[in-house]
């Protein structure tokens, strides 16, 4: 109960504010999302990578993300083959289970649970997941050759891509950013997490309650909330990870489906109702499952 009150409740209250405001005022999310994508998040990412001590732990993080992604994709493909689902259903299941909400949900949870050190790992993993989601997510939503081309275009349009590259380049060159330039970056970055949390609450308010296909939804929920963290735990046992990083990665792997992936499902007609259903249910149930995982991990 202490973990729920000290970690989960403050985050849920911010989500709730975004949800209520969206239901009440019907705010246009697009300009707020654009602000977060093009200004706030790049500032947070640049600051994190600029100050981070880059070492082999970040390499292990990349390996972890790749193994987890392909393990979940493989499980989806085997399940779709067994159930004789069409390719669009398989794509919808992959979209809603392979990509977790490590940004506007995972990062604040980890901040409250593990402090600034854990948060630095969480932001790095958030960037990695954004790259993966914006490439493989677009690919599985669009499928085929055009999917690959479009995925590359989306990846190159991501401001965080250039924020990471610039921060890493400055570190490699040993160049220091003057205080008068870093101060506005740090000031802007402080607004990133609360803003994206509010956006998630607003996004959830727009997901419609429809007649769910409970067979497919149940599979998606089990894979995203239960099997994914178990796979993550297994992967962490095989690598010499920092204990804190291992906890961060397991918690991140237990996050609900990424809300932004619903946009890809809608844009490319990759079973958007199924994807939004799994996103909604995993987000609601994650309040309980993440609390339990945090209690287990300590």
Image: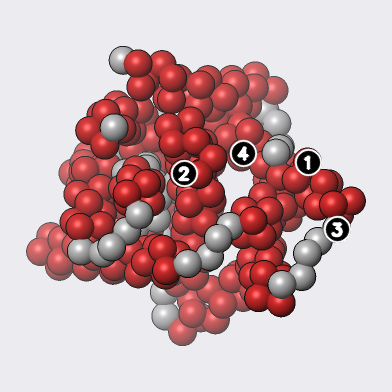
Q: What secondary structure is found at the residue carrying circle 1?
A: helix
Residue 234 lies left or right of residue 246; in this view the side is: left
Q: CA distance from mark 1 to mark 4?
A: 12 Å
- Observer-nearest of 72 and 63: 63
Q: CA distance from mark 2 to mark 3?
A: 26 Å
Q: What secondary structure is found at the residue carrying circle 4?
A: helix
Task: Point out which mark residue 178 bears.
Answer: 3
Whether tag 2 and tag 1 are in contact, CB under 8 A, the answer is no
Residue identified by numbered label 4? 193
Q: CA distance from mark 1 to mark 3?
A: 15 Å
Q: Is residue 26 above or below residue 20?
A: below
Q: How dense is the environment of label 1, judged by Cα within 10 Å: few (below 14), some, or many (20 and up)?
A: few
Figure quadrant of residue 24: top right
Residue 22 location, x and y as percent?
Answer: 63, 26
Figure quadrant of residue 82: bottom left
Residue identified by numbered label 1? 187
Q: Nearer the viewer, mark 2 or mark 3?
A: 3
Q: Residue furthest front?
A: 174
Q: What secondary structure is found at the residue carrying circle 2?
A: helix
- What residue do we see at 70% from left, 31% from top? 27
Q: CA distance from mark 2 to mark 1?
A: 20 Å
Task: Point out which mark residue 118 bears.
Answer: 2
- Observer-nearest of 211 and 44: 44
Q: Earlier in the sequence, mark 2 or mark 3?
A: 2
């Amino acid at each position: 109960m202490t973990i729920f009150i000290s970690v989960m409740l403050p985050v849920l209250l911010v989500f709730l504010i975004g949800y209520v405001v969206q239901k009440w005022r019907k705010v246009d999310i697009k300009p707020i999302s654009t602000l977060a994508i093009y200004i706030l998040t790049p500032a947070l990412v640049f600051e994190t990578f600029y100050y981070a001590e880059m070492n082999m732990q970040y390499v292990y993080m990349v390996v972890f993300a790749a193994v987890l992604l392909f393990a979940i994709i493989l499980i989806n493909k085997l399940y779709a083959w067994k159930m004789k689902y069409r390719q669009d259903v398989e794509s919808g299941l992959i979209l809603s289970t392979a990509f977790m909400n490590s940004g506007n949900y995972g990062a604040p949870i980890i901040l409250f649970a593990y402090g600034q050190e854990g948060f630095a790992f969480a932001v790095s993993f958030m960037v990695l997941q954004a790259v993966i989601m914006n490439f493989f997510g677009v690919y599985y939503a669009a499928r085929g050759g055009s999917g690959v081309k479009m995925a590359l275009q989306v990846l190159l349009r991501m401001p965080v891509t250039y924020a990471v590259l610039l921060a890493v380049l400055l570190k490699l060159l040993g160049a220091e950013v003057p205080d008068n330039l870093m101060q506005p970056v740090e000031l802007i970055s402080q607004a990133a997490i609360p803003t994206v949390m509010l956006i998630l609450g607003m996004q959830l308010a727009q997901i419609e309650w429809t007649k769910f296909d409970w067979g497919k939804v149940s599979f998606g929920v089990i894979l995203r909330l239960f099997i994914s963290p178990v796979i993550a735990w297994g992967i962490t046992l095989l690598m010499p990870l920092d204990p804190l990083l291992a906890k961060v990665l397991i918690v991140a792997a237990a996050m609900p489906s990424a809300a932004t992936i619903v946009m890809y499902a809608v844009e490319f007609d990759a079973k958007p109702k199924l994807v939004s259903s799994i996103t909604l249910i995993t987000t609601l149930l994650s309040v309980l499952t993440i609390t339990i995982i945090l209690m287990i991990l300590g």
